[in-house]
Image (cartoon, grey):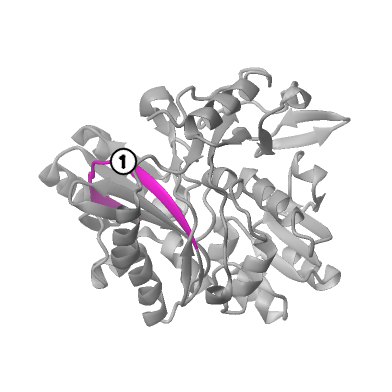
């Protein structure tokens, strides 16, 4: 069987590596891919958001399945366009991907169906947003309504910080059209947990819990990034909490989307806060999270290709999905200056010295036999072990062997 994976980051590398384990899969393309993905898939120079070219390539090459991984092409309707040409595609259609593409849609959905989440208000006028912020006080959370590469959220500890965030988004255009509308939310406290779930629009099966580290620096300081590392399982997500989430959040969300005429088929990511008043939804993502995927898929003991097909066919309930009884830690090595300005083209050395981890490539390119940096997040060094503490130790031991100029990584992934 032939598979086309759309995307080119660490998440897509993890998906390609996991698909390659399937005895049914004998050919993988990845578009656009990256320097590391090239070792497991044929990279195709098509932008992940170029629906016309991607569909044309699929029509020409006739893959048995196309897996659309990133948020942008899902929100733009790539799955719809592929299906219109009779191509089997994995991922939510455009009308379901809106659950991530518009935070105000997601919040309104949760309010309508009584799914626990933070109190919120939506604004497209900065003066009204500022008045609301001053009325509510700080700490408070300001979110760009649309897709902003994981960087559209400001957890403001002061009123002035929140005011600046709202004005920068609405008037300053720092997130382009994605920030023309903002969602302003109540500040929640408690441990954060990410739970990814496979769903065919009716049935739902969760993956092991994970936790992402979004801030750039140790101790959760500095600007928000796309994610500086992740580990699985969460230290806080008990079986009792999992059951509460299933009953009050996971199943009601799938039912709500179906009720709205937007059945969600694919991977739905639940970003949760375990508050003193119970679990609440921080956000939905309409796809595998990054870097949680690197940690979670490293623990999968079932055939990912079979899972994708069961979801497309609406037969997820017939699928038994097995996970290893272990733990995983992914440490992201980023370019110096990320998530702000950073340089590319730095040579990466030491990759062949890694012994106990798998290095997922996020922002790399292979040029004249050398592996070079080509993005903000560069590598996701991911280790598994019987315990989380051992996985963390193994991942950092291998991080220390890899070098590139101005490499930056957090030293506390998995510790909190």
| Dominant SS type (magenta) | strand
The residue nearer to you, when weighing 287 against 242, is 242
Quadrant in which the N terminus appears: bottom right
Residue 377 location, quadrant: top right
Which residue in the protein does label 1 denote? 191
Q: Residue at x 45, y 44 (%)?
A: 233
- Judge whether 130 appears above or below 23 on screen: above
Tell me if residue 158 is in the magenta stretch.
Answer: no
Q: Secondary structure at mark 1?
A: loop
The residue nearer to you, when weighing 228 against 395, is 395
- Judge whether 237 appears above or below 371 on screen: below
Horizontally, is 172 left or right of 5 in the view?
A: left
Is residue 19 in sight in this rendering?
A: yes
Q: Residue furthest left?
A: 135
Across and down, in percent, residue 373 comes to 70, 30
The region drawn magenta spans 181-197
Horizontally, is 403 left or right of 164 in the view?
A: right
Instruction: Bin the neighbour count of mark 1 within 10 Å (Cα to Cα): few under 14, some 14-19, many 20 and up.
Output: some
Across and down, in percent, residue 393 comes to 54, 24
């Amino acid at each position: 069987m032939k598979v086309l994976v759309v995307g080119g980051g660490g998440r897509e590398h993890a998906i390609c590596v996991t698909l390659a384990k399937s005895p049914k899969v004998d050919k993988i393309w990845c578009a656009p891919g990256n320097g590391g993905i090239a070792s497991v898939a044929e990279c195709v120079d098509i932008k992940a958001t170029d629906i016309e070219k991607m569909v044309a390539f699929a029509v020409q090459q006739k893959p048995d399945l196309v897996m659309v991984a990133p948020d942008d092409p899902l929100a733009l309707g790539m799955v719809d366009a592929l299906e219109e040409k009779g191509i089997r595609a994995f991922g939510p259609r455009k009308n379901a991907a809106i659950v991530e593409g518009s935070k105000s849609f997601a919040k309104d959905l949760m309010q309508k169906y009584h799914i626990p989440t933070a109190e919120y208000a939506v604004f497209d006028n900065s003066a009204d947003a500022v008045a609301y912020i001053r009325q509510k006080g700080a700490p408070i959370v300001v979110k760009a309504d649309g897709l902003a590469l994981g960087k559209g959220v400001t957890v403001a500890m002061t009123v002035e910080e929140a005011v600046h965030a709202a004005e920068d988004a609405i008037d300053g255009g720092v997130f382009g059209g994605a920030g023309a509308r903002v969602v302003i939310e109540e500040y929640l406290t408690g441990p954060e947990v990410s739970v990814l779930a496979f769903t065919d629009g009716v049935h739902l099966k969760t993956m092991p819990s994970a936790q992402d580290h979004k801030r750039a620096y140790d101790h959760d300081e500095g600007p928000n990034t796309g994610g500086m590392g992740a580990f699985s399982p969460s230290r806080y997500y008990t079986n009792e909490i999992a059951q509460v989430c299933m009953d009050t959040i996971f199943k009601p969300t799938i039912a709500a989307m179906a009720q709205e005429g937007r059945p969600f088929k694919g991977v739905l990511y639940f970003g949760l806060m375990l508050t003193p008043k119970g679990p609440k939804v921080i956000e939905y993502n309409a796809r595998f999270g990054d870097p949680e995927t690197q940690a979670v898929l490293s623990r999968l003991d079932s055939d990912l290709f079979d899972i994708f097909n069961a979801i497309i066919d609406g037969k997820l309930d017939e699928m038994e999905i097995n996970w290893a009884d272990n733990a995983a830690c992914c440490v992201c090595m980023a370019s110096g200056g990320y998530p702000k300005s950073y340089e590319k083209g730095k040579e990466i050395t030491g990759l062949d010295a890694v012994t106990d981890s798998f290095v997922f490539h996020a922002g790399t390119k292979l040029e004249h036999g050398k592996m070079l940096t080509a993005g903000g997040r560069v590598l996701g060094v991911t280790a598994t072990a019987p315990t989380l503490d051992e996985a963390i130790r193994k991942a950092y031991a291998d991080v220390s062997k890899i070098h590139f100029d101005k490499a930056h990584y957090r030293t506390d992934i998995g510790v909190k």
